[in-house]
Amino acid sequence: MSDFLQTMAQSSAVRAAQAPSFVDADFDKPVVPLTLGAFDLIAEIKQRSPAEGKLGCQSPYSESKGASHLISRAQAYAAGGAAAISVLTEPSRFDGELAHLEEVVAAVPDTPVMRKDFLVEPVQVLEARKAGASGVLLITTMLNDAKLGAMLDCAFEHGMFVLLESFDEPDLARSATFLDRDGQLLIGINTRNLRTLEVDADRLERLGPSLPQARCVAESGLRTADDAARVAEWGYSMALVGTALMRSDDPAALIASMREAGATACS
């Protein structure tokens, strides 16, 4: 690891060291099952992106209802049929925090919420579960096999799904070795290199023939229904979409159109 990803890993390790210990009674919020169709979206809420700048904004929903933009955006995502909602909790570069995840969990109790962060220790999976998360994102290249296995086991023992993010063919092959674990594992391909923050627009198509027999998620750079249809043709059955939805005036309609286009391309 180096550069941005290494910086995030170091910062995350400091946060993990400050996390409290947990007992079973702490996990009183229900896990919401991840129910999947022909083509699904994980819709993302993030305040800021290092590559795109500030994304948080007031929406027509919040202006009319007096709700925070987090709540209104989450409710719009659920109305559009998002299979899950991803919430950034990294504070230094994404302006996130666990309180945002808790707010979203309370706002959309029937939609699973995933913690997205640069997690490096099992205790951070437990933090997510206590906050009400039904899933977590883990980044393959940040973790050795022993740590990755321990974090997967921790998530699965608590009924959570895991989105395991890869960047290249070796990453993808390594991620696939964990598919025999007893839990709901999604395999993600991120077009953004988190070491440099550069986007490789051809990565999703290039890695399509190497995708394992699993639910595979196309991440970063998807903005339109045509994008969803294209990745579905390459073998992906899900997409994680953030910036386009945060900037959309009608995120529910955008989610619905992307889901429909992807499902049509899959059929």
Image (spheres, grey):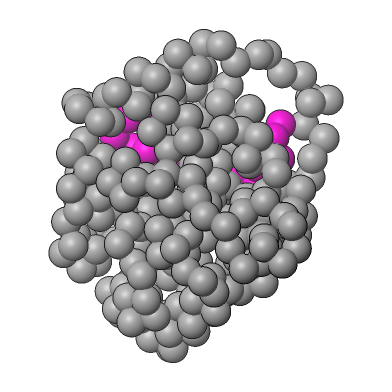
Residue 186: x and y in percent read 46, 54
Of residues 155 and 12, which is closer to you in this image? 12
Question: Taking the image as drawn, is residue 85 in sight?
Answer: yes
Instruction: Determine the residue positioned at 42% across, 28% down.
Output: 92
Count up the numbered dots.
0
Image position of 84 with respect to 116: above or below: below
**Residue 26 image-quadrant placement:** top right
Question: Taking the image as drawn, is residue 154 in sight?
Answer: no
Residue 107: x and y in percent read 74, 53
Q: Does the magenta stretch include residue 134?
A: yes
Of residues 209 and 33, which is closer to you in this image? 33
Residue 58: x and y in percent read 57, 57
Instruction: Determine the residue positioned at 44% across, 57% down.
Output: 242
Please indicate whether residue 248 sits to the left or right of residue 126 in the image.
Answer: left
Magenta residues, start to end: 129-144
Of residues 10 and 34, which is closer to you in this image? 10
Instruction: Determine the residue positioned at 51% across, 71% down.
Output: 249
Image position of 193 with respect to 222: above or below: above
Tell me the quarter of the image containing the N terminus: top left
